[in-house]
Image (tube, rainbow, N blue to C red):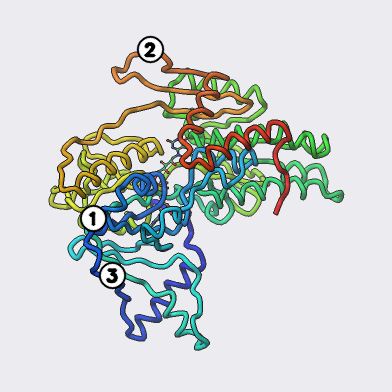
Amino acid sequence: MLSVTRTQPLFRQVAADTLQARKNFGIGVRKLSWPSTRHRQRLVILGSGWGGYGLLRGVDRSRWDVVVISPNTYFNFTPLLAGCAVGTLEFRCAIEPVRRYSPEITYYQAWCDEIDFKQKTLKCMPATQPVAKSTTGIESQVETSAQFSIPYDKLVIAVGAYSQTFDVPGVKEHAHFLKDARDARRIRSRILECFEQANQPFLSDIERRNLLNFCIVGGGPTGVEFSAELHDLLHTDIQRHYPRSLARLAKITLYDVAPNILGTFDQSLRKYTEKTLAREGLRILTSHHVEKVEAGKMWVKEQGEVPFGMLVWSTGLAPNPLIKSIRGVEKHPQTSSLITDDHLNVIMEDGTPNPDVWTIGDAGTIKESPLPATAQVANQKAKYLVKKLNKLSKDQEHTVPFEFHNQGSLAYIGNWKAIYDRPNPDGTEEGFMTKETGRVAWLLWRSAYFTMTLSWRNKILVPAYWFLNWIFGRDLTRF
Ligand code: FAD
């Protein structure tokens, strides 16, 4: 059974409890009504990630009555999160606010919990703290945290996926995940806390070593990039500003159950990365199985008990609970993502595509040609849907199926080096810029993500922070 890590925030639980109280008191789900003065069709977008936000930016907002529902008031530029987690960039550089587009669009900070394809309605739960409107106690909370329902004409499901834990006990409680700018903030705070704790004068060297043991589980691109960024932090700013004796005790270990890290990259690039990371003093333990995690320690089948100061868990994707809960549609047998046709329409149980519902990003898979769950795919699908919906709003047809153009994969591997892999469509090895390593790939990495940065504000902030931190070092302040 799959398990997910994004534990429901406390306020969501409170909202669920108050909803139950509402039901007990016989109070139904609140239906929101909209003025019928607007004759545009309502397009509801679920999620504000690579898929949802990409669509929001491009869709003709003057022709559609756009409603966005997402528990996040912002978009996460995920490739920059590892850098934010160690202070190479500030958190602001990796987010874009959804509110930039309101009041042109309607936005609710909420979770969609249920989709009724027949009635074309959604049930949603506020993702805000319940706020008491009056002084009448429980009733006021019930009132303000009520579930609400929203009708749609067209629906785009872009709710992404959660982090996979493989049901390893204790992971949810004691490991850090890296999916969101908030996670990056927690990680940064914990790294610096480990160093401040280890610096206390009354600790033994063993206690210090345990606190400064940083473990990363999952050797995919996210695990590798985070390890590399952490390595850069330890070997530059930490060495500069903490006692030498302390910095020397810090250790990074990258674990994976598979025999190799970066399984999706070409073998030569994998070998190059392993060699480079090992030379930099980063330990890679492949074919290692984490069995249990407790506060400050984990059990590895091949090693026994391993104490740590911080554990970052990045072992792939688990389905979003909303996607899991949807019935009457075709789903991928392994990933449980929604199956779509090559126009990205969700395929219903009877095998017919639903003409009013699309899914993009990590929540969906094309039946004929499954693609990797990446920002690149989500972004291209969003752009495709923009074209389709903009034509549809003018009563024009868009009959071209979605086609993915692989621009290659990049991963930062530390010390101003990266790898770049772009397989030839015909499967051959030869060609211009199909594989790059080292500084050239690093330049590609930085220019690619600078180019992809969405707003002018971040196009200025991202290079500015890269430059400032190169000159003055990272900010080691812990809030
Ligand atoms: P997401 O971007 O995850 O967005 C999902 C949205 O849905 C969020 O706004 C969420 O709050 C919202 N949501 C969730 N549940 C609900 C609900 N019930 N109702 C309403 N809204 C909901 N890919 C690359 O191609 N290159 C990279 O370099 C790269 N680096 C990465 C680095 C990190 C640290 C991570 C975590 C991922 C990285 N990826 C990268 C993968 C990439 O980020 C994902 O594939 C991409 O985010 C998928 O986009 P999405 O829109 O499907 O989901």
282 displayed left or right of 202: left
Category of crowding for the residue at label 1, using alpha-carbon neighbours closer than 10 angstroms: few (below 14), some (14–19), many (at least 20) = some
Q: Which residue is mark 2?
A: 431
Q: Which residue is mark 3?
A: 34
Give the residue displayed 79% in from the left and 34% down from the top. Answer: 240
In the rendered structure, which amino acid carries the disc numbered 2? Gly
Asked if residue 123 is positioned above or below residue 180 in the image, the reply reads: below
Give the residue displayed 18% in from the left and 40% down from the top. Answer: 398
58 displayed left or right of 357: right
In front here: 180 or 214?
180
Give the SS element for disc 3. Answer: loop
In front here: 146 or 386?
386
Query: Which numbered disc, 1 or 3, marks the residue that appears first in the sequence?
Result: 3
Query: Where residue 442 sits in the image (x, y, percent)?
Result: 55, 24
In the rendered structure, which amino acid carries the disc numbered 3? Trp
Give the residue displayed 70% in from the left and 35% down from the top. Answer: 234
Quadrant assignment for the C terminus: bottom right
In front here: 13 or 309?
13
Query: Which numbered disc, 1 or 2, marks the residue that appears first in the sequence?
Result: 1
In front here: 40 or 309?
40
Front tag of 1 and 3: 3
Q: Which residue is mark 1?
A: 154
